[in-house]
Amino acid sequence: ATWPLLRHGELQRQIGGAVVPLGLLGGAAVAGSGLALTALGALGLGRATPDRGGNASPPLVEVTRSAAPVAGAAPTTLAALAARMPREGDQIRVERYGGDGSERRFAVYVAGTRSPLGFGGREPFDMSSNVQLYAGRSSASYESVVSALRAAGARPGDAVLAVGYSQGGAITSRLSVGGPFRVVGNVTFGSPVQADPGDATLQVTVRHTDDLVPALQSGGHPDRAGAAGSIVVERVADPPPGMADVALGAHSIDAYGDTAALADASGDPRVDDVQERIAAFGGDESAEVTTYRVRRPD
């Protein structure tokens, strides 16, 4: 009952500590940030929903395979999922299982924003896509992920394990509530968008309480959302407040990888259950791994 009042407490504490030298202006910054985050939640922003874009045509994107498919082992831990997140160049990684004639299954790893100041340029993982996803609409980056999965052989109804970081988490969350595939797991790291995909999707939310980006989803769910066994993993990534926090170190994928590793090593039975499900999804098969680079057309 008290969680909605306290959900941004750590973030505001750190903002306050960082702006102490600004005096009254710093106090106004703390108050303003709290009001802004409350207003965003009241407006219903930061929630993944099926497309609100009406009958508009989906954005055009060019999806290019960046290298020939290679074989790879299946992941078994949360840290392994974070480690597979594309970091440079490519924005999307797809792993295909079931090449031996068994049911096709796909894991997709979706990177975060690549052009934080871009609005509608060739890079689809830009601020324009962030705004569209945050408002519950389709985006060029979302269409890129759907196209990459199709290029890897995924068909409507195929099982997909979706893993997203930052903007990638907004994409996978939207995919889990209204996409063409059967998303059996949605794992997000620092997503600005929350989702309630229903009882058929295991949802793992990893967030930092001192990270501004997941705070944009009104702090996220107070408890799990999704299938039984879904969990929320959170911690304070960088406790000491300071002006260096402007660089959003608590939002880096490396910081989220550290949090995932701590969860894996925690011995918590809920995390053990998630690890078992991750391992069962890939099984003992070798994955066909393909990476993709996407662009808006000229």
Image: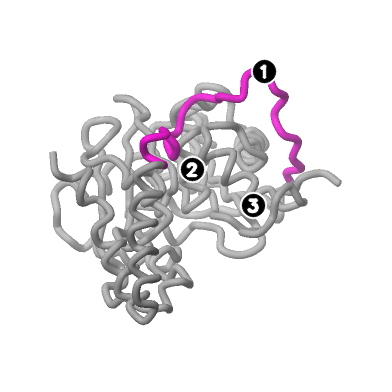
Q: Residue at x 18, y 45 (%)?
A: 3
Q: Secondary structure at mark 2?
A: helix
Q: Residues within 10 Å of mark 1 (few under 14, many from 20)?
A: few
Q: Residues within 10 Å of mark 3 (few under 14, many from 20)?
A: many
Write the start and end of the magenta stretch as one range: 40-63
Q: Residue at x 53, y 45 (%)?
A: 95
Q: Is residue 232 left or right of residue 116?
A: left
- Label 1 is placed on what type of residue? Asn
Tally the numbered discs: 3
Could you say which is closer to the camera, residue 93 or residue 10?
10
| Residue 170, label in figure | 2
Vertical position of residue 44 compared to residue 245: above or below: above
| Residue 55, label in figure | 1
Locate the N terminus by quadrant.
Answer: top left
Q: Residue at x 24, y 58 (%)?
A: 9
- Label 3 is placed on what type of residue? Asp
Q: Is residue 152 visible?
A: no
Q: Is residue 29 left or right of residue 67?
A: left
Q: Position of residue 55 (x, y in %)?
A: 67, 18
Task: Specify how the rendered protein is coloured.
Answer: one colour
Q: Position of residue 252 (x, y in %)?
A: 45, 66
